[in-house]
Image: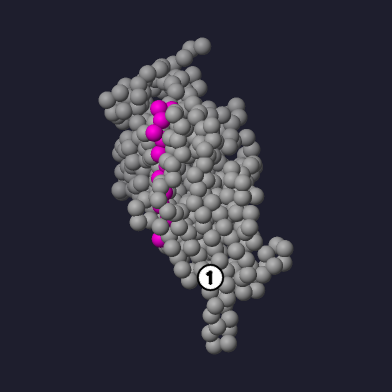
Amino acid sequence: MKKNIYFLGVILVVVLVFITGISFAYWSLNLKQEGENTLATSCFDVKFNETSGSNIKLENAFPMTDKDGSGLDAYQFTVTNHCETYAEYNIQLEVHDTSTLDDQYVKIKLDSHSPQLLNNYNSMEETLLHDTNKGYILETGYLDSEESKSYDLRVWLDERVTTETKNENDSDVEKSAWGGYITLSASYINKPETNLSGINVPVVEEGDGLHKIDHKEYTGTNKGFANSEFRYEGSNPNNYVKFNNEENKWRIIGLVNVQTEGGVDERIKLIGEEIEVTDEEETNWNDSSLMNNLNNGDYYTTNLTSEAKSMIDTDIIWSIYQNDSSDKTADSLYQEERENGTEWKSTNDIKASIGLMYTSDYLYACTDSLSTDSCNNWIKPKEESLLLSEGSTKKIQPVLYLSSNVKIVSGSGTTTDNYILEMNEN
């Protein structure tokens, strides 16, 4: 069942001002939603309503940079599912068929997403309104029963637009007009979840919980990594697991791609609580006393039970990667960590049972940022180094991958109900 709700926005482009003999376009942008729009049936009620006082009315606006456009007052709206069924929905922007301004000059910012040109969004297969000829999907979301999602929408003219700019049909942009409708389509689906090595876990779209991470197509020399993973994000998701006969000391990073001696596969990745280990000041991880301590030394022989050791995958190939992540995203780091022959990636990967987290592991756990500049997540410590040095003693968080024979048999991942692991001998 599909329903749509919409508002009309119009951009008028005119030349109004001349200063010291140099002309420039003086633009007018007006978007306005009057009141609340609601469409409902006996079993489906998704509301698309205006937040009080949130009308955009930008007069005498002009082409602007992404920084300035992102600072505009937002048009705010809320989508609510009042039914008893889980729903999937699309937020769409349909272009009025009288529009003459090319979509490549219309800039969109929805919530905290990076600004994009309208024509860079995925196109709708078919528009919902009779007076539109094309449309774009701005976002796909999911709503549980009685759940709401609020949005901030900003629209402006791209900074490339000048009095000399032409549309693709060679008409003058300064004499063009553009109109559009926000529409909503929704349908019932089964609540998304994934099998986390034996137990079905809900997949969430925002906030604390297990998130699906869609990677850009992997183009590195180490081919074969899947295009998606499942990782826990947020300040305190329910990802505690009883391991090494310890409760609340180990947590699940996610069900992630990994290189093994047998090829690329997916494994449950765990991270332990912060511990202190003795280590010399060394730069080569493969030959370091820390690596030996974790895999063959006191930590491995003394701190881990025989059952815990039997659950660890010992065929993992760990990437050795120099941390230079001050201005990089989780996605870019994920690829570079797996790409041999780059500026920062060592070719001396190592087979080991226990290691440290990748920088991308840390950033993918964030909810508010995918860069090291700002990150709110459950992994400690929050320092960029991820490896704290205090003289000859280091504070680290051991990281390991569970064998494919290990299954989660019970639990909910909370501090009072840790996930419980068992070896599957089949």
Evaluate whether residue 328 shows in this view: no
Q: Residue 417's image quarter?
A: top left
Residue 85 versus residue 122 in the image, above or below: above
Is the N terminus in the top left, top right, bottom left or bottom right quadrant? top right
Q: Amino acid at mark 1?
A: Trp
Q: How many marks?
A: 1
**Residue at the extreme bottom:** 20
Left or right: residue 64 versus residue 168 is left
Residue 175 versus residue 251 in the image, above or below: below
Query: 180 or 396, which lies in front?
Result: 180
Q: Position of residue 229 (x, y in %)?
A: 51, 34
Residue at horizontal 50 percent and vertical 22 percent from the top: 404
Q: Position of residue 38 (x, y in %)?
A: 44, 42
Q: Position of residue 218 (x, y in %)?
A: 61, 42
Query: 279 or 250, which lies in front?
Result: 250
Q: Residues within 10 Å of mark 1 (few under 14, many from 20)?
A: many
Residue at horizontal 58 percent and vertical 87 percent from the top: 21
Residue at horizontal 31 percent and vertical 49 percent from the top: 391
Q: Residue 79's image quarter?
A: top left
Query: 365 or 204, which lies in front?
Result: 204
Residue at horizontal 46 percent and vertical 68 percent from the top: 59
**Residue at the extreme left:** 416
Q: Position of residue 271 (x, y in %)?
A: 39, 34
Q: Is residue 219 magenta?
A: no
**Residue at the extreme top:** 426
Q: Is residue 82 magenta?
A: yes
Q: Which residues are the magenta region?
A: 73-85
Q: Residue 125's image quarter?
A: top right
Evaluate whether residue 22 shows in this view: yes
Q: In the rendered image, which residue does mark 1 sit on? A: 27
